[in-house]
Amino acid sequence: MKFTLSWLKDHLETEADVHRIAEAMTMAGLEVEEVLDPAAKLAPFTVARILSAERHPNADRLQVCQVETVDGLKEIVCGAPNARAGLTTIYAPIGAYVPGLGVTLVEKPVRGVVSNGMLCSASELELADESDGIQELPPEIPVGTPVAGLFGAEPVIDFEVTPNRPDWLGVAGIARDLAAAGVGKLKHFDIAVVRGAFPSPITVRLDAPEMCPVFAGRVIRGVKNGPSPAWLQKRLTAIGLRSINRLVDVTNLIAYDRARPLHVYDVAKLVGTEIVVRRGGVHNLTAGAEVIPGTERPEMFKALVGGEYILQPDMCVIADNGGARAIGLGGVMGGESTGCDETTTDVFVESAWFDPLVIAQTGRALGIHSDAQYRFARGVDPVSVTPGLELATRLILDLCGGEPSEIVFVGEPPASPAPFAFDPAYVKRLSGMDLADDRIGTILGQLGFKVTAGPADQAEPWTVTPPSWRRDVEGRADLVEEVARIEGFDSLPDTPLPPVARPAGGVLSPRQARVRTARRALAALGYAEAVTWSFTKQSTATLFGGGDDRLVLENPIAADLDCMRPSALPNLIQAAARNAARGFADAALFEIGPIYLGDGPGDQRTVIAALVAPHAARHWAGAGEDALFALKADLTALLEEIGAPVGSLQLVQGQNRDWWHPGRSARLQLGPKNVMVEFGELHPRVLKALDADGPILGFEIVLDNVPEPRGKSGKARGSADLSSLMPLTRDFAFVVEDAKPVGDLVRAAAGADKALVADVRVFDVYRGKGVDEGFKSVALEVVIQPREATLAEAEIEALTARVVAAVEKQGGKLRG
């Protein structure tokens, strides 16, 4: 929403400048986006007079002009066809920024002749859309006169309007709030009633009163349409609107001045003498014609701005020809068929009130966002129907002449807001502001609220009735907000809150601390955090063991979010698929949040879920490290970070639920009743159902199943135990059953001598010739770190024997 300072002063007596107005608006709750000051942009430009103009010696279309300027006599090269001796025009000095060209003038030769400035056109200063040459000014204007004053350039305030304040979409509404804030005095204008000279030849019928409960209109005959006067064109152009003609400009002016959209129809283009307000949709195109079932066709509508639209039954349509032809979308836009032009002599002026929800849905469905739709969707003042029509009539008669008919008024406007009880002491209770009752009553009265005082002994001594344009005010708290913003939010008391003792154990619970640690650890490992819905589609929930009717939502926010999620993985998979569809296939995502199992009152669990989609670009060196083992390494590092008992976990394969790949997944558990983690590759069947390309690997930690770490002793960590002796390695190859987890062999070898065995690594797994069917050969590298002295050969052999014995207890046999 934009308006100029002079426009505001039509409604507000004030001496405040534009910056004071903008500050007052901000303090009153209006969000000022920008203050545009064209005068500042035009400050370098002044009036000059060409004394002589001679042909450029090196260019046929250029002239060398001797120009009298505010800076003295200047030689300027000009290519405008109308440059001539005696012409009064606009001068730009060296260093000036020319907004229409986007350049800053510098002193440089033009075809060998130095130009000491520039002579400007209106378009080069953005005072017009296009120009044929440099600006021609009246010769009586003195040289050196600032250009900004000549063109009436004035500041424009641009601000955002919150959806609950449609009254701010008119300059009169802004003036009302500023007057209440003490910036000036509100001007009150009584809109004079224009008496009709004859009955209206156009009647109105409401067939959809739920969409348009009230409709007023009148015919004005004998008008003379054409370009608007300069003052009206200037006012509309200043706020970015294009002047069209007098009739249309009047409706645009009232929409921005009073937040009252109107529309005018060319009577000569109407079919019949009745306007019908009805629902859109399938409709026969000839009044009274019989519609044969199966031959109906969608109703089409061609808008004023171009484009053809299909009308639906939930849209409000203005029609003529007995209701057969759509000539307007009520509250949104008029039709091309009845638009006013230079030949229009008789018009029908429409002033109606349309249901905001209907208008909002129509604009969204058709993608039409007009000034009328913007206002009606937020709620226009129903009481302005007749005053708006009277004001439009007066302006049209003043600008276009003509003779008005009597007003046609059908329907009943919506009821005004209901009064409610209010205690002025509630202002201090809710805001802390200690204001006198008279001050509170004055603020509310200036904003248009009707305050009626009752007996002082009543619990709520006042009765307050909101004005018709403030349907957002529904209770006491709304009134306190109005008083607080007008008095000024800077007047709110700054009493500090009472100090609260810090909890002895810190502000985070152990669970919260774990979540924070996990989030940082995963981010450090290269995963990006995703925040997805706690809902999913029921069919998707079924894929992950959910979909129970108890978890289906009665009122979902979307059709594909109708069930509480049993796992965080499906949402992450779909997020990875969306990234892949946009060219980012190599995803690594995680999420920490709730899942819902539907097995009782405590069915909510907190999980840490992560996935990787290893789709890196192809390379001659191959894929590198197996993604599954990389995922397991990340999982192990995360568990260690959050204090899980990693050394005590059992790795179990073949028992994961069916959304995991049966041969490439496992679980980590503390016994069969406490499954902490499931990890591995997601089943291709599940990925296909979610429209995701595999492979995708992931894990899901049930944080509730991870035992809390044991309390710390409080002792400081000791110094690192680093040996000065060189480590040595020994390689072993053990033959074990194919189903035997390799991790069991690693733990057995590491436990053979915890003092000397520093590390155990798997460097090869072999199946094939030399190894029996159903068995595999696992090669281990055991790192031995001497502590006190170099180990003798006998000591090394004894340690080797202990390693072999430990692994043989797990079913391994040393390979010969």
Image: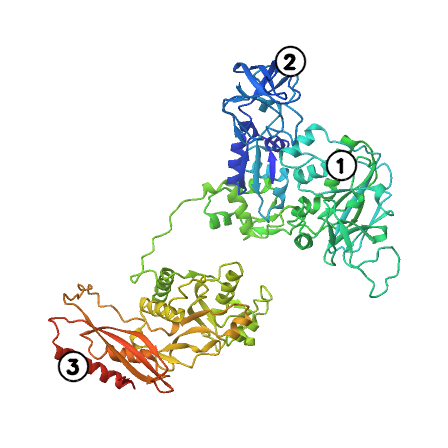
Q: Quadrant of the C terminus?
A: bottom left
The answer, for residue 182, to whether it is visible in the render is no
* Badge 2 element: loop
N-term mark: 3 or 1: 1
Left or right for 684, reference 714: right
Q: Amino acid at mark 3?
A: Ala
N-term mark: 2 or 3: 2
Q: CA distance from mark 2 to mark 3?
A: 115 Å
Mark toward the viewer: 2 or 3: 3
Disc 1 designates what residue? 247
* Badge 3 element: helix
Q: CA distance from mark 3 to mark 1?
A: 106 Å
Which of the 4 image quadrants contains residue 717? bottom left
Left or right for 330, reference 130: right
Residue 668 on image: x %, y %: 37, 76
Mark toward the viewer: 3 or 1: 3
Discs 1, 2 touching: Cβ within 8 Å: no
Disc marking residue 86: 2
Report the front residue among 719 and 709: 719
Disc marking residue 35: none
Vertically, is 764 above or below 481? below
Left or right for 621, reference 372: left
**Which residue corresponds to the image point at 53% horizontal and 37% vertical from the top-left?**
34
Disc marking residue 798: 3
Q: Amino acid at mark 1?
A: Leu
Q: Residues within 10 Å of mark 3 (few under 14, many from 20)?
A: few
Residue 190 on image: x %, y %: 70, 35
Q: Amino acid at mark 2?
A: Gly
Q: Quadrant of the N terminus?
A: top right
